[in-house]
Amino acid sequence: ANDFGHTLGWGQKYPGDAHCNGVTRSRTKALADLRNWVGAVMDRSTRIANFDVYGILPEDGCEACDFKLAELSGKRGMNPKVNIAGKDQLLMKEAGLPVPLFLCLYFSAGFAAYMTARFQMNRRHTPIRNKLEYGRQGVGIACESVPPQLQRGLDGVKIKCGSFVEDASEYFPPRAHKGTRGRSYREVGFLNINWQAGLFNGADRAPACGRVCATREPAKFNDGHLDMYRWKFSSLLRNPTLCVQTDKKKDEMTLEHCGGRGKGIFFQWDGEARFAFSPTGDAFHIHIRKMLCIPVVLGPSYDAKVTGDPDNGLPVQFSFSGTETQQQACRSRILRGVSGDLNHELLATRSDMEAAGLYCQEPPAQAPASTAAAEAEAEAASS
């Protein structure tokens, strides 16, 4: 499903396909739908709106990100893990393009990102079979043991939202001052558009009675806020709907991972999943903030009930966001992305992965010394 097209009111699929989703339509009807679609695009009365674009950048004052990216490898099927040294291990490979820069739709770390990484190795030829494959991988993750390369749940993950100088606030784990850890949570992230995978959307957090009786503000793509969410399996019992509870946070967020050597976290942006880690085993940070505001054209099927009023009270125009220093950092980052310099900064080499104690695409005959040491440290810490 095309979540971006769905959100803006242009539909989830190409309108001129006479055999869309297995539904038989005449070529005449498909052609008429395509003409209507193109006519709406060219109509001068068609509405336009601002659209926020976020991005992954180094933290303020830093020249580069302090993490590297790998891509999940292994065998196709329900379980990609390989038994090495008596344990089921994840295999990694050098990540391909795209390199994460712009975030237009959503971002998450944890369960859904790991599921997406496994799905990417098992992609099917039809939308229905793809959805079934997502479900198969999700069931597999829930039933399998946690591989050594991952923490249990979101243990070791911390998230701050807002400007660190002015109003930074702890978002995850919730109630951290009481000693709460992230291991019971499965996923954390944010929505920019109010659709994910053609199934899920979000609305402001409210008690049970408010969720039933009141109208809640949806996730909006041009209000300058990250619609943050977090959930664990028990969340599905307290809120058994496809509408997740969100918390609006201003401007930016930073995810910190403190898993240690040989461990990392899967994250996804706009449907692409990667494994983030530190070659040295130090804590690393995924910093996200608003980079741009761009004009978008709204289609005839735009649904304000789901996405809200598209008029945010500002002139519809292209602009960079933030202070002058931040705007210059955005320009520089975009130029580096276009020139390919970000590939060297973010994409891990095989030596980076081996330095971190990760197993690469072809497993070695014995465990790397760094991995054995990391596993010994983990067992000592747990005991």
Image: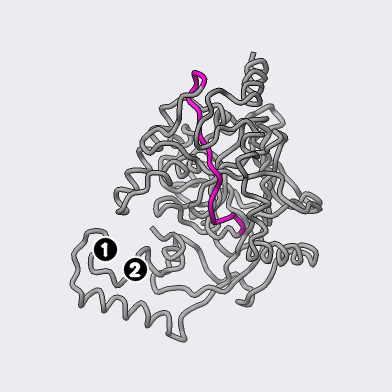
Magenta residue span? 85-101
Q: Is residue 349 magenta?
A: no
> Which callout, 2 or 1, points at the residue further toward the start of the chain?
2
Q: Is residue 41 above or below residue 132?
A: below
Residue shown at 33% from the left, 79% from the top: 36
Q: Is residue 263 left or right of residue 231?
A: right
Q: Outermost residue, top direction? A: 383
Residue shown at 55% from the left, 32% from the top: 359
Q: CA distance from mark 2 to mark 1?
A: 8 Å
Identify the residue position indicated by label 1 in the image: 20
Residue shown at 46% from the left, 86% from the top: 44
Residue 308: % across, % down? 50, 63
Identify the residue position indicated by label 2 in the image: 14
Q: Is residue 289 left or right of residue 78?
A: right
> Residue 110 appears in which quarter of the rendering?
top right
Asked whether the residues under the numbered discs 2 and 1 touch, taking CB atoms below 8 Å apart as contact, a structural biologist would say yes
Q: Helix, strand or loop at disc 2?
A: loop
Confirm whether residue 205 shows in the render. Answer: no
Residue shown at 60% from the left, 69% from the top: 312
Q: Is residue 91 magenta?
A: yes
> Residue 236 appears in which quarter of the rendering?
top left
Q: Outermost residue, bottom direction? A: 44
Residue 361: % across, % down? 50, 37
Quick one: label 1, few (<14), some, or many (20+) residues within 10 Å?
few
Three-letter code for the amino acid on which mark 1 is drawn: Cys
Q: Nearer the viewer, residue 352 or 60?
A: 352
Residue 366: % across, % down? 55, 23
Q: How is the image coloured?
A: one colour
Q: Nearer the viewer, residue 38 or 273?
A: 273
Three-letter code for the amino acid on which mark 2 is drawn: Tyr
Q: Is residue 168 left or right of residue 77?
A: right
Quick one: label 2, few (<14), some, or many (20+) residues within 10 Å?
some
